[in-house]
Every structure is written in C-alpha cells, then in structure tokens.
Image (cartoon, rainbow, N blue to C red):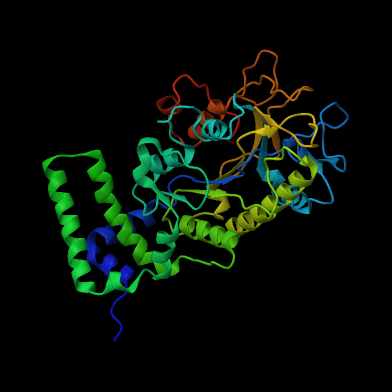
C-alpha cells in the first residue's frame, strides 16, 4: 500500500487548527473586496493605448486611430486586437488613470512608488496591506504568483509561488521527505504545540507569524488537490490558480507579472513601435483570459470579478519623443487601469498636457483643474486603500487620497 502523501500527512498533523482555519477562510471569502494586480514590468508606452495624443508633437503609434468607450479615448490599431477586445468587453467597467507622477526614472524606485506610494524600504505594498488587514486569517493571504512585492512588516502573510509551492500542490516533493508519514505528523503536531506554549509565555510577532503559518500550511495542503498547476502553459496556470485561490477564499490578494512575448520588452530604448506593439497585444490577450475567467466564476453575489478589484499598471511610461535608435527612454509619469468590484467605469481620470506631463486634478472627481493637485502615486495608493475601507493615513501619512475611484 502506498503511504499517505506528504501533503495529506501534514494536513492531518495540523488537523484541528487547519479545520478551524478552513471554516474561517470560507466565512471571510465574501467579506470585502479582493485585489488582483496585473503588473507590466519595464515601463509601457501609454500613448499606444491609454493616453494617446493625436495631432500633437508627442510621438504616437503612427498606425493607430482614436477610439472611444464612454469618456475614455484610447489608441486603436489593427495590430493590437486584444486591446480593442478589452475595451469592447470591459471598457464600460474600467477607469483609465492618466498622468500619475512617480517622480523617478529608475525601474526599482518607480515600482516601489507605484505599489506602495513611498520610497521607504519599510513601505508596504497595496496587496500586502489589503491582505493583512482584511484576510490575515486566510490560508494564503497574499499570493505572489509572479512579479514585484514589498511586504514591509507584513511578510508573514505573503506567499511566493515558487518550485516548492508548486511541488506541494502536485505532491511531487522528493519521496524521502515522506518516508515515515507517522513521524512527520508527530513532528508537525509537536511544532504546533511548542509554538502555542512559547506564545502563551510571551507574545512575539515573528513567532506569531511562524505559528500562524503552520496552520495555513495545513489548510493549503488540504486544498492542494483542487489547485491547478500546468507547467506546459505557465501564463494560463497562473490565471487558473489566481481564480481558484480567490474563489475558494484561500487568498485575499494576488500579484501576477504580465507575461511577455518572446523577444519583446516594455523597456523599449530601441525600436519602440515594434516592441510596444507586441507587448501591449500579448499582455492584454492574457489579461482578457484572466478577466473572462473572473467574470465566469461565481462569487458570493454575482461573479468573482464583481468582488475583485483588478489593477493593471506599469512603473513608468516612455518619453514623448523617439531617440536616435527609434526608441523611447524612461519617463516619470504613467497610467493605470482599474476595473471590477465597486469601480464605476467608462471614465478617464487625470490627464497629461502637450509636453506629456501630468496635469493637476480635482481629487474628488479626477478631472483636470488649474486649482487642483498633482496626481502622485501616493494619492492613488491612498485612494485605493480608502476604497477597501482602510485608513490611508495609517500607511501614507499626509497623502490626500484620490477619492474618485469607487462608485
């Protein structure tokens, strides 16, 4: 007889605690919105889709034509049918946010600024905040399937999906690790009891995170058979896993780095038109698969997309003119798209002027205003936190939130 699998043993070894956490996760799955970040690393040229400047001095895709969805004007090109399908299918549910100031041209700094609102190494990204504040009792509060993460002091709720994680799901860890299942179950139970004993004597944050992680590991292994893995198509596998984690109430937040076509790059210092065209098409073709899957998956009320905020972004944009290599260099303003739960779509917030510089806006409406304020990444992050019923001041002191995001 084949001995019990490793994931089954550990799930049983943490039995009562794991069962309690499953019940907690199921109860909390519909309490509040989920957050999913679709991140395009490298710095996209927003004139190719979200922030076109037709008829001016800013270099657009020469083959694009203006198109509109609601009050969103976007760049339509025959070579980017996925972008067209996105606006046809989801434009009325989307907000395009233009002219976001990141105040840097460094990839790392801009990524941190866009996801945390600050440059501090102690800064915590949106997903980690939302997960820790609204889903800390779930098995995988913030699942990083790929892409950047800045957990700050909330690292205990972040799970990087790597080879070990995937091995747990497929039950393909080395056989010698499960040579004596009864011994492993006893060790797991002893670890849980010892953690409880030490915490009873003195509450310590790191020890608490470790102890809670034992319970979450048991839940994850108990659910592992229902979590999809597909090495043949990594992009589809990440989409399927993201949807399952959210639908089953195992995660509150998910981060995915958008896949890129072979040979294409968002960081288009040369051949900008070629690389940006390919990158926009490939990213949005896969984004559509994700959104279609979220829209088809039943949620607590309505679809899973109805209760999940999807943030589509990149750390920076490209300069307004081509360089000597027909490329575009880094630019300290960018755009983002929001759609899903609670988002009142079909709108454009913010704008860039004819020098491709972000214009001041009214933070309550998102409309450009001569008496308005700069749309910084901190104000965008603060506005998103407010939309999740969290206090922006606790995370970004002094940053006035962009309150125009949610309906």
Instruction: Please indicate, yes or no, whether residue 203 appears anywhere in the rendered image.
Output: yes
- 256 or 310: which is nearer to us? 256
Q: Is residue 359 left or right of residue 299?
A: right
Q: Position of residue 52 (x, y in %)?
A: 79, 34
Q: Is residue 277 left or right of residue 7?
A: right
- 124 or 132: which is nearer to us? 124
Q: Quadrant of residue 122?
A: top left
Q: Residue at x 44, y 27 (%)?
A: 120
Quarter the C terminus occupies: top right
- 25 or 218: which is nearer to us? 218
Q: Residue at x 37, y 52 (%)?
A: 138
Quarter the N terminus occupies: bottom left
* Number of residue marks: 0
Q: Residue at x 38, y 65 (%)?
A: 168
Q: Position of residue 267 (x, y in %)?
A: 67, 40
Instruction: Please indicate, yes or no, whether residue 298 appears anywhere in the rendered image.
Output: no
Q: Is residue 73 left or right of residue 219?
A: right
Vertical order, 354 against 116 (above or below): above
Q: Residue furthest front?
A: 324
Q: Is residue 147 left or right of residue 202?
A: right
Vertical order, 216 against 333 (above or below): below
Q: Quadrant of residue 374?
A: top right
Q: Position of residue 354 (x, y in %)?
A: 79, 23
Q: Position of residue 271 (x, y in %)?
A: 78, 42
Q: Residue at x 33, y 54 (%)?
A: 24
Q: Residue furthest top?
A: 371
Vertical order, 381 against 156 (above or below): above
């Amino acid at each position: 007889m084949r001995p019990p699998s490793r994931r089954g043993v550990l799930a049983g070894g943490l039995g009562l605690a794991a069962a309690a956490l499953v019940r907690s996760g199921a109860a909390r799955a519909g309490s509040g919105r989920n957050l999913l970040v679709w991140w395009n690393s490298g710095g996209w040229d927003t004139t190719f889709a979200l922030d076109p400047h037709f008829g001016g001095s800013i270099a657009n895709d020469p083959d694009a034509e203006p198109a509109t969805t609601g009050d969103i004007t976007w760049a339509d090109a025959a070579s980017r049918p996925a972008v067209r399908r996105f606006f046809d299918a989801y434009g009325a549910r989307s907000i395009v946010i233009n002219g976001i100031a990141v105040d840097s041209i460094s990839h790392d700094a801009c990524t941190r600024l866009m996801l945390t609102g600050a440059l501090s190494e102690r800064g915590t990204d949106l997903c980690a905040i939302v997960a820790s504040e609204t889903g800390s009792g779930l098995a995988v509060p913030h699942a990083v399937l790929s892409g950047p993460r800045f957990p700050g002091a909330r690292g205990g709720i972040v799970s990087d999906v790597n080879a070990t994680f995937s091995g747990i799901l497929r039950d393909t860890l080395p056989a010698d690790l499960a040579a004596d299942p009864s011994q492993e179950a006893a060790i797991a139970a002893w670890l849980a009891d010892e953690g409880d004993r030490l915490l009873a004597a003195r509450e310590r944050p790191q020890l608490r995170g470790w102890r809670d992680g034992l319970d979450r590991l048991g839940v994850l292994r108990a659910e592992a058979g229902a979590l999809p893995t597909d090495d043949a198509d990594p992009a589809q596998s990440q989409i399927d896993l993201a949807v399952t984690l959210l639908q089953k109430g195992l995660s509150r937040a998910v981060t995915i780095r958008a896949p890129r076509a072979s040979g294409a790059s968002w960081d288009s210092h040369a051949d900008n038109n070629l690389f940006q065209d390919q990158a926009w098409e490939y990213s949005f073709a896969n984004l559509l698969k994700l959104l279609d899957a979220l829209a088809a998956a039943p949620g607590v009320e309505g679809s899973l997309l109805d209760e999940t905020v999807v943030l589509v972004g990149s750390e920076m944009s490209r300069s307004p003119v081509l360089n000597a290599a027909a490329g575009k260099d880094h630019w300290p303003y960018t755009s983002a798209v929001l759609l899903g739960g609670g988002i009142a779509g079909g709108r454009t917030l913010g704008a860039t002027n004819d020098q491709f510089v972000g214009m001041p806006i009214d933070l309550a409406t998102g409309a450009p205003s001569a008496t308005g304020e700069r749309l910084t990444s901190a104000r965008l992050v603060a506005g998103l936190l407010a939309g999740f019923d969290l206090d922006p001041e606790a995370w970004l002191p002094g940053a006035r939130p962009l309150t125009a995001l949610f309906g």
